[in-house]
Amino acid sequence: MGILAIQLGQAGLEGVTPRLCYMNTTDTIAEIITAGYLNSAVQNGYQFKESDMVCVTSQASPGAALAVGWYEVSYSNPNWSLTSSNGAPGSVTLPTIANHIATYTGVGGTLGEDASTAINGGNIQAGLSGTAGYLASFPSTALKGSLRLTAVANTGDTLVTVSNAAHGQATVYSIPDVGAATGGILVSTSALRTKIVAAAAAAGGAAAQSFTDAFCTSASCVVGNWNTQTNAASVLKIVPGNGSFVATSSADAGVGTFNYIIAKA
């Protein structure tokens, strides 16, 4: 039904600014703050001022309980509109969305939601003992899934902590696609570092080929295989050294490329 009644000002308060006005509606808050909401009322002879404060009733849905809120009048040619009043300390920026976390929009206590960055000075917890919860992060593209950090039940009431070691640079770690519905992550009781190299050049000329890689140490574990090769040959053993390793094949593979993985503690 929209706007049911409008009262501009009160008797005995003519000339007082701001003017307090009243509006009885059955519209939702989203409809009330739509640009040009007051245009039809203006066309019917109601003369609003930009200094007006309007007390408005609204309904979330037909038959729902009435809600009451204060709104400011704004004019931007050609639209007369209502905007939620944020001037009073402790006010709320409307409309709100169910289940969205409220955050302060300034130092005056005004509450809003969906801030670009929401900060808590302490810890953040998802769920509680006996009630599951997870942390979810969505990409900027719609309908492209999400990343979740989810806990499962431990054998006992123990904590599992994921943390970083001290880094000397900014680093981005990417989780590769395992190509299956489930997968695992390589773990170690000490810090484990790996390096993957594809198509390292090999000159050929002997069954034993040396590859230079500063990441390698004599204590490293190196696995590898021929990516391309001139002659048929298979890898028999790989011996790591400091700054290089030697891959020995069943025959001289000739000119080709070699794929390898180096792991070290």
Image (tube, rainbow, N blue to C red):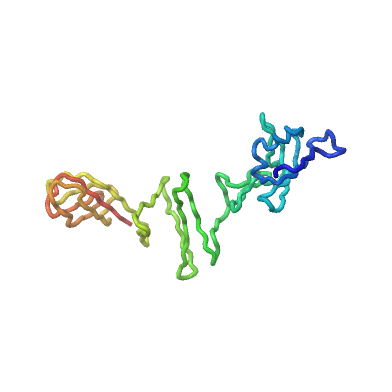
Q: How many numbered marks does the figure carry?
A: 0
Q: Nearer the viewer, residue 50 or 23?
A: 23
Q: Position of residue 57 (x, y in %)?
A: 73, 46
Quadrant where the C terminus is found in the figure: bottom left
Residue at x 42%, y 54% (from the top left corner): 165
Residue at x 65%, y 47% (from the top left corner): 111
Is 109 left or right of 217, judged from the image as shown? right
Task: Answer above or below: position of 110 versus 13.
Answer: below
Q: Nearer the viewer, residue 79 or 91?
A: 79
Q: Nearer the viewer, residue 139 or 10?
A: 10
Q: Position of residue 4 (x, y in %)?
A: 74, 43
Quadrant where the N terminus is found in the figure: top right
Q: Residue furthest top?
A: 77
Q: Position of residue 138 (x, y in %)?
A: 48, 49
Q: Residue furthest right?
A: 12
Q: Nearer the viewer, residue 6 or 89?
A: 6
Q: Position of residue 168 (x, y in %)?
A: 41, 47
Is 6 left or right of 213, judged from the image as shown? right
Q: Residue furthest front?
A: 1
